[in-house]
Amino acid sequence: MMMTAFPDNWIWDALIASSRIHGHRKLGKYAAQQLLELEPDNNKYKTLLSNVQASIGWWVKVEEVRKAMFGKDLKKQPRWSYLKKNRHIHCFMSGD
């Protein structure tokens, strides 16, 4: 089966997520590298790459990626979660 569309950031992002769930670390690393080629300054993808490297146990590589992010002053953006209960919406930010 051949892919008929050029893989974009959505496809590579989905591959990283599925590779982490199913333990396909090499595929996750490859997908993270492809994402960084598409968007080299996107800190989300650098974080994903370091997470994949951490799951493999490549702590030196994790440190390199994190130092590069710190050197460029790239930080993870806080994420929000929403929960609806009894007609009320409750918002939570990562770290709450």
Image (spheres, helix red, strand yellow):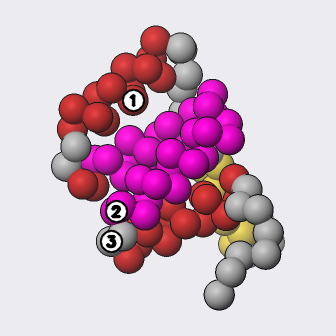
Q: In 3D space, how far apart are the residues under numbered discs 2 and 3 (Cα atoms)?
A: 6 Å
Pointer 1: what residue? Answer: 65
Q: Amino acid at mark 3?
A: Gly
Q: Amino acid at mark 1?
A: Val
Pointer 2: what residue? Answer: 25
Q: Residue at x 65, y 49 (%)?
A: 80
Image coordinates of residue 86 in percent, x first then y, are 73, 75
Circle nearer the N terminus (2, 1): 2
Q: In the displayed structure, would residue 36 be above or below residue 90?
A: above
Give the image quarter of residue 87: bottom right
Q: In 3D space, how far apart are the residues under numbered discs 1 and 3 (Cα atoms)?
A: 21 Å
* Relative to 67, 57 lies left or right: left
Element at badge 2? helix
Q: Amino acid at mark 2?
A: Arg
Element at badge 3? loop
Q: Are marks 2 and 3 in contact (CB under 8 Å)?
A: yes
Q: Are marks 1 and 3 in contact (CB under 8 Å)?
A: no
- The span picked out in magenta is 25-54
Element at badge 1? helix
Pointer 3: what residue? Answer: 23
Give the image quarter of residue 76: top right
Image coordinates of residue 37 in percent, x first then y, are 61, 39
Q: Residue at x 54, y 26 (%)?
A: 75
